[in-house]
Image (cartoon, rainbow, N blue to C red):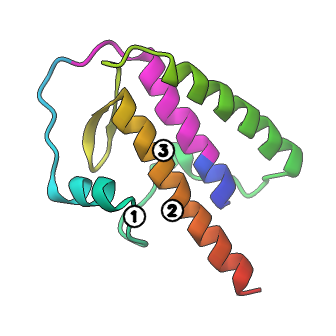
């Protein structure tokens, strides 16, 4: 579930970046957002995932491999997109391309830590 969630999140964020028009508004950076980006740590149990990135109960190895390939292509397209493209996080607000891609990295590291904890407890 953690892996599928990361891949769905990566694809959703990257797709939003690629399909957005340049953002010209003011970007507000609240305290939690600043702390997450400064520390690179997302506290556990603080937020609920949007429905679009909630994994199915039917994940298979082949399905995850396909999602991984799609997420890789999405990330590559997003990295090559206009630096003024943007994505809006439900809690942290608008992020331009570079900050949104940094969030993907922080988010996925957060879930990798959860995966390692699950594996170490079995």
Helix, strand or loop for disc 3: helix
Q: Which residue is mark 3?
A: 104
Q: Position of residue 77 (x, y in %)?
A: 56, 19
Q: Position of residue 95 (x, y in %)?
A: 30, 35
Local crowd at mark 2 within 10 Å, few (<14), some, or many (≥20)? some
CB contact under 8 Å: marks 3 and 2: no
Q: Is residue 16 above or below residue 59?
A: above
Q: Which residues are magenta?
A: 7-23
CB contact under 8 Å: marks 1 and 3: no
Residue 100: image quadrant is: top left
Helix, strand or loop for disc 1: loop
Q: Is residue 59 above or below residue 73?
A: below
| Residue farthest toward the bottom in the current orientation of the protein | 121
The quadrant of the picture occupied by the N terminus is bottom right
Q: Which residue is mark 1?
A: 41
The quadrant of the picture occupied by the C terminus is bottom right
């Amino acid at each position: 579930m953690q892996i599928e969630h990361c891949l769905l999140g990566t694809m959703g964020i990257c797709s939003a970046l690629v399909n957005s028009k340049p953002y010209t508004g003011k970007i507000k950076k609240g305290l939690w957002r600043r702390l997450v980006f400064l520390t690179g740590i997302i506290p556990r149990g603080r937020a609920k995932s949007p429905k679009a990135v909630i994994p199915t109960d039917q994940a298979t190895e082949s399905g995850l491999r396909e999602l991984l390939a799609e997420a890789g292509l999405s990330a590559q397209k997003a990295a090559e997109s206009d630096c003024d493209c943007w994505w809006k996080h439900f809690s942290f607000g608008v992020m331009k391309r570079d900050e949104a891609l940094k969030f993907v990295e922080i988010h996925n590291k957060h879930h990798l830590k959860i995966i390692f904890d699950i594996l170490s407890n079995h």
